[in-house]
Image: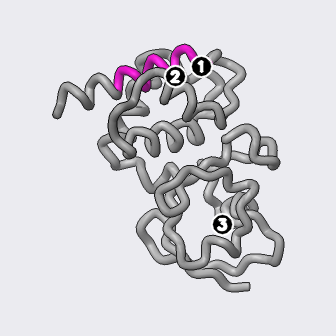
């Protein structure tokens, strides 16, 4: 089955098998920032933006993205907000093993694109779909709060 969609700002035409997940299609296409984790939609390692909303690509049928806009971490590398998020995660020591970080970055990016109010409760709620066994979420939440504070100052 042929699908056409927008991947990181560029038209993509992929051949996918019936029942293939978006994560499987990404891996076959060499998109590796989308991590393979639980394959049940529980860990968030495979989070991408689908028409602006964070989704777990391991539970989305690849055929569903036909005509959609999909953004992976690669598509946001030059984005000022993403750069700020990455910088703060590093500055706050929130990057430990790093496996959850791409999904966490996508999730936090989507939250911050929604705009205020973004408090600690909202950050923690957004991150409930991202399993991180190294940080206990303290440092990623602190990093996200720093980004929110910087965004409020720059207004």
The N terminus: image quadrant: bottom right
**What residue sits 26% from the left and 25% below the top?**
150
Q: Camera-side residue: 51 or 11?
A: 51
Residue 137: mark in rendering? 1
Image depth: mark 3 or mark 1 in front: 1
**The residue tagged with tag 3: helix, strand or loop?**
helix
The CA span between labels 3 and 1 is 31 Å
**The residue tagged with tag 2: helix, strand or loop?**
helix
> CB of mark 3 within 8 Å of CB of mark 2?
no
Q: Which residue is mark 2?
A: 140
Local packing at callout 1 (Cα closer than 10 Å; few below 14, some 14-19, many 20+) is some
The CA span between labels 1 and 2 is 5 Å
Image depth: mark 3 or mark 2 in front: 2
Mark sitting earlier along the chain (3/2): 3
- Count of residue discs: 3
> CB of mark 1 within 8 Å of CB of mark 2?
yes
Residue 84 lies within the magenta run? no
The CA span between labels 3 and 2 is 30 Å
**What residue sits 35% from the left and 27% below the top?**
147
Local packing at callout 2 (Cα closer than 10 Å; few below 14, some 14-19, many 20+) is many
Q: Is residue 40 left or right of residue 111?
A: right
Where on the picture, by quarter, is residue 126?
top right
Q: Which residues are magenta?
A: 137-147
Instruction: Residue 51: give x, y in percent of width and height.
Output: 49, 63
Q: Which residue is mark 3?
A: 29
Q: Is residue 81 left or right of residue 31?
A: left
Where on the picture, by quarter, is residue 119?
top left
């Amino acid at each position: 089955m042929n699908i056409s969609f927008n991947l990181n700002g560029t038209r993509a035409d992929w051949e996918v098998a019936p029942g293939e997940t978006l994560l499987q299609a990404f891996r076959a296409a060499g998109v590796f920032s989308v991590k393979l984790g639980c394959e049940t939609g529980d860990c968030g390692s495979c989070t991408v933006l689908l028409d602006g909303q964070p989704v777990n690509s391991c539970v989305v049928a690849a055929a569903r993205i036909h005509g959609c806009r999909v953004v992976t971490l690669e598509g946001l590398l030059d984005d000022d907000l993403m750069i700020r998020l990455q910088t703060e995660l590093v500055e706050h020591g929130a990057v430990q093993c790093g496996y959850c970080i791409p999904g966490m970055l996508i999730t936090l990016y989507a939250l911050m694109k929604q705009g205020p109010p973004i408090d600690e409760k909202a950050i923690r709620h957004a991150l409930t779909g991202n399993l991180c066994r190294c940080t206990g979420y303290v440092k990623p939440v602190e990093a996200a709060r720093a980004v929110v504070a910087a965004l409020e100052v720059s207004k």
